[in-house]
Amino acid sequence: MSKKPVQLSKTSGLQFVYSILEEATLSNISPTILIIENDPPSLELYRRELGRDFRVLACFSKSETVDAIDSQNPKAIILEPTALNEEGWDLLNAIVTLPDRYLPVILCTILDERKRGLQAGAAAYLTKPVLPSALIEALHKVIKKTESTR
C-alpha cells in the first residue's frame, strides 16, 4: 500500500496534517493526537516527527480543542500550558475531568512546574527542549497504558 504526500488543509479552525493511505478504512488509520502549542517551530517539528506514527491535529483555542476531542476521538493530547495564556491549565483540568473517558495529556513545556502538572492530572511531563524520540516514546507509553486499562 503506497502513501500519498502529506496534505495540509484548514477546516473549522483545526489544521489537519496526516498521511492519506489508499483504500484506508477507519480501523487502520494512525491514532489521532491533538497538539496545543503556540511556538511555530515547535509545532512544525512535532507535526513532522509525529506525523510518521500519528494523525496530528493542531488546536489553537480551548473551544477548538473541546470540539476536536468530541469529533476526532484523539488517543492523547500534547499541551503547552502557556499556549493559551492561562487557559492552558484550565484546559488540562477540563480534559482530565471528562466524565465519560480518560484522555492522557502530555505536558510539553518550557515551564519547570512538573509537580503542578502531574498533580493536575497530566499523564507525563516533558520540559523543553524535548527530543522528538522522547515525545514519541512518551506518546506510545501513555496510549498503551490507557488501552491496557480499558
Image (cartoon, helix red, strand yellow):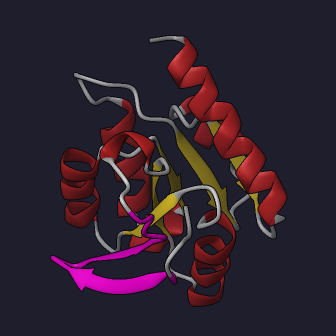
Identify the residue at image location x=31%, y=85%. 9
Q: Is residue 37 above or below residue 24?
A: below
- Across and down, in percent, residue 125 comes to 69, 45
Q: Nearer the viewer, residue 108 or 4?
A: 4
- Across and down, in percent, residue 30 comes to 49, 51
- In the rendered image, residue 2 lying in the magenta stretch gets the answer no
For the record, the magenta segment spans: 5-22
Q: Is residue 118 above or below residue 10?
A: above
Identify the residue at image location x=65%, y=79%. 42
Quadrant of the rendering where the C terminus is positioned = top left
State left or right for residue 134 relative to residue 141: right
Q: Nearer the viewer, residue 77 or 30?
A: 30
State left or right for residue 50 relative to residue 132: left
- Across and down, in percent, residue 36 comes to 45, 66
Any part of residue 14 in sight? yes
Q: Is residue 102 above or below residue 148?
A: below
Identify the residue at image location x=38%, y=46%. 74
- In the rendered image, residue 12 lying in the magenta stretch gets the answer yes
Q: Is residue 38 above or below residue 95?
A: below
- Across and down, in percent, residue 25 comes to 33, 48
Q: Quadrant of residue 142?
A: top right
Quadrant of the rendering where the N terminus is positioned = bottom right
